[in-house]
Image (cartoon, rainbow, N blue to C red):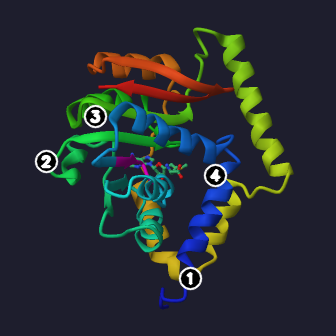
Amino acid sequence: MSQQRIDWTGWLARWDDQQAGYLPDREEQFALMLDVVERITGTPARFLDLACGPGSISARAAERFPAAEITGVDLDPFLLEIARQAVASDRVSFAEADLRAPGWDGVLGDQSLDAVCSATALHWLDPADLTTLAQTLAQRIRPGGIFLNADTMRLGPTEVPRLDALAVELRDQIWSTSHANGVEDWETWWKAAAAEPAFTALLTERETRFADRHKGRDITLTDTVEAFRKAGFAEVAVLGQVADKHLFAAIR
Ligand SMILES: C[S@@+](CC[C@H](N)C(=O)[O-])C[C@H]1O[C@@H](n2cnc3c(N)ncnc32)[C@H](O)[C@@H]1O
């Protein structure tokens, strides 16, 4: 079936609506991330949207930084196809890579990066993968460049069990309220995609790529801080927090 009739921009917008149910004030968070990038690095020349999905951050970065070269990297062939169809331009490109694989950053060529932003994605990794990822980013981001991540980072089930449980409860409450207010949830979005025959091949490939998705222990805030400190980032801090969602920043 031809993909000509697919409303790619519509799928991206529907994704954005769905994701807003999981990251409180997602649009404001993205705007804040780009503000921070500009304040720390000036206008970035090379920007990476890490685990970009269908390109939400890439699209906003392209608008905000009209001279920047933007790359989105992800493992999901279906979400990348939405990104390529809805967002790609001569300044914005998308590449496939598994962030757990050594040397994944080969897809970026040999240039260094001014800024790397990520949202609601790195909690898919195990803590050991995050440590390696931070080391790779430390080599890729130029001195004075920045890494920002808006994502779930557990407070620490063993370090602070009551506060950790409370934060998860508060997070679940935020999600339930969003969904009770009619925001589409993750499962419904993916069911709708699966009902579109033109997507079948990409979704089948997606299943294969994530078949070995390992769900070890959840990444904590301490894991994140330690990974980026040990990797050699000069300054590491949390810029914002709601329940277990943190806006984490690390200056190289
Ligand atoms: C919830 S989505 C968020 C996408 C996007 N950052 C956003 O905010 O809309 C999580 C993303 O992480 C990607 N991802 C998870 N594990 C990955 C891995 N090992 N390598 C590359 N991408 C990965 C998924 O494919 C998915 O696109």
Classify mark 3: helix, strand or loop.
helix
Residue depicted at 35% across the width and 53% down the height: 73
Residue located beneath label 2 in the image: 110
Q: Earlier in the sequence, mark 1 or mark 4?
A: 4
Residue 243: x %, y % from top left: 69, 26
4 on left or right of 231: right
Task: Decide which of 32, 226 is in the foreground and name it.
Answer: 32
Spatial CA distance of label 3 from label 4 is: 25 Å
Q: Is residue 124 above or below residue 59?
A: above
Residue type at numbered disc 3: Leu
Which dot, 1 or 4, sits closer to the camera? Answer: 4
Task: Decide which of 96, 251 is in the foreground and name it.
Answer: 251
Spatial CA distance of label 1 from label 4 is: 23 Å
Residue 19 visible, this angle: yes
Under 8 Å from ligand 1: the CB of mark 1?
no
Mark number displayed over residue 137: 3
- Mark 1 burial class by Cα count in 10 Å: few <14, some 14-19, many 20+: few
Mark number displayed over residue 19: 4
| Placement of the C terminus among the 4 image quadrants | top left
Verify whether residue 164 appears in magenta: no
